[in-house]
Image (cartoon, rainbow, N blue to C red):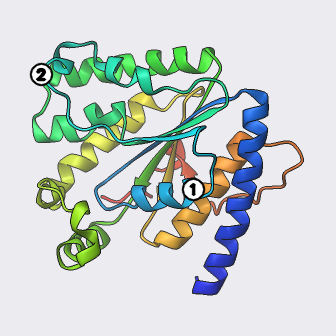
Amino acid sequence: MAKNDYEDTLEALQIQLVETQAWAIEQGLKVVIVFEGRDAAGKDGAIKRMTEFMAPRQTRVVALPKPNDRELTQWYFQRYSPHLPAAGEIVFFNRSWYNRAGVEPVMGFCTPEQHERFLHDAPHFERMLTQSGTTLIKLWLDISQDEQSRRLEERTTHPLKRFKVSPLDAEAQKRWSAYSAARDQMLERTHTDYAPWTVVATDNKKKARINIIRHVLQQLNCPGLEAKKPDSDIVFAADKAKGRLAK
């Protein structure tokens, strides 16, 4: 996508996001958008473009650090619950409770029993959310191993990407297969009709961002707003992802 085409398309979509949020505030909607995916899949960049012109008082981005000793003893979902939206708010989770379906079991930060308990409980937690009137949009950003390797290497050499470097970056490539297996199990066990997963192919960052915004606009469905459908080669339902996920 040419730079000018991308910027023009992005600006038009950001205007639609602003219009949609104004309507959501008027209607008192509660919206949660979960961004999950492999390291370097583009979560930060997509969230940044989406929130750039949104209402600061009604928009929050939640990126929690690792739990402290007290939080480790709490009900697992307890540390996420205080960040859920009130009426008129949109909350972006840059990684979420799904840490327990990916990073934690792969890196040994939780027990197999805790992992299994999460996979059992998450659909129930999300059913309560959606039944209480919360709109829940779950996005899995998928990336190929070669593209992830290139982006992780770029982080170590680009002076403006210093704060993106993580001690776990090296493990992302070493444990690629384990992360793939955890992802597949997560999508299979937690993709429901009331809280479905949507997969986004992100090897092309610009196309991914454009299509993520289109998908969110389509899900929120602001009356009178004609949002173009996302590209089905880039955005697709998790239950239609067989053979299309990076292995």
Please tell me how crowded label 1 is: few (under 14), some (14-19), or many (20+) other residues with Cα within 10 Å.
many
Q: Amino acid at mark 2?
A: Asp
Which residue is at 16% across, 26% downward? 68
Q: Residue at x 23, y 77 (%)?
A: 159
Residue that sits furthest to the right in the current view: 224
227 or 29: nearer the viewer? 29
Q: Under tag 1, what secondary structure?
A: helix
* Residue found 69% across the figure and 77% down from its top: 8
Query: Quick check: 211 left or right of 44?
Result: right
Query: Height in image: 116 above or below 228?
Result: above
Q: Which mark is residue 99?
A: none
How far, Cα to Cα, is label 1 from label 2?
34 Å
Using residue 100 as the reference point, say whether residue 199 is left or right of it.
Answer: right
User: Residue 73 appears in which quarter of the rendering?
Assistant: top left
- Would you say 109 lies left or right of 78 here? left
Mark 1 or mark 2: whose residue is earlier in sequence: 1
Q: Position of residue 60 (x, y in %)?
A: 50, 40
Q: Give the residue at x 23% y 25%.
A: 115
Please state the horizontal and vertical placement of residue 219, each as a whole percent of the image: 68, 42
User: Residue 102's spot in the image, x, y percent?
Assistant: 26, 40
* Quadrant in the picture for residue 49: bottom right
Query: Residue 69: which numbered mark, if any?
Result: 2
**Relative to the observer, which residue lies in front, 106 or 220?**
220
Quadrant the C terminus occupies:
bottom left
Assign a secondary structure to mark 2.
loop
Disc ID at residue 50: 1
| Residue 96 rendering spot, x and y as whole percentages | 37, 36
Dot 1 amino acid type: Met
Q: Residues within 10 Å of mark 2 (few under 14, many from 20)?
A: few
Q: Nearer the viewer, residue 8 or 99?
A: 8
